[in-house]
Image (spheres, rainbow, N blue to C red):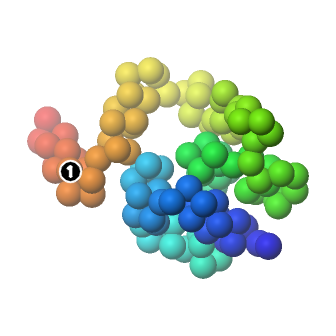
Amino acid sequence: MDIAQRITLARKNKGLSQAQLASMLGVSRGACGQWERGVTVPSVLNLSRLAWHLDVRFEWLATGRGEMIYVAGVRETETVYDQDKDFIQADQKEVMRIYSGLSARRKTALLEFLRTL
């Protein structure tokens, strides 16, 4: 099973559409589609976020090695590769968290608003 198939399997097991997953990650639905078709591969940061949101182990998602799910419901408390951990302040992370939960229409409206400031 390749990485595209693992992403698709994990997303479907979680009961999410590509659009829902994309919204959770703050990426386009097209990006998720490209990952699942094997056109592109997610960055390490996006792989880490995928693993977190899909409740699968990072190593399994990235390489296919090991178990897909966490043993006995134990989940890593921190993402494996959190590149923005030391560079993004708490308030910036909060803005990103809120933004990632918005619909595409609201994201566009918010960006337009911010550009006027």
Q: Is residue 32 left or right of residue 50?
A: left
Q: From the viewer's perspective, is residue 5 above or below residue 14?
A: below
Observer-nearest of 12 and 80: 12
Work out which quarter of the rendered image holds the C terminus and state it: top left
Q: Is residue 30 left or right of residue 76?
A: left
- Residue 28: % across, % down: 41, 62
Tell me what residue is drawn at x 59 percent, y 24 percent.
86
Amino acid at pointer 1:
Arg
Q: From the viewer's perspective, is residue 45 above or below residue 20?
A: above
- Residue 90: % across, % down: 44, 21
Tell me what residue is drawn at x 69 percent, y 49 percent.
56
Residue 115 visible in rendering: no
Q: Is residue 54 left or right of residue 5?
A: left
- Residue 69: % across, % down: 74, 48
Residue 92 visible in rendering: yes
Read off the residue under disc 1: 106
Work out which quarter of the rendered image holds the N terminus and state it: bottom right
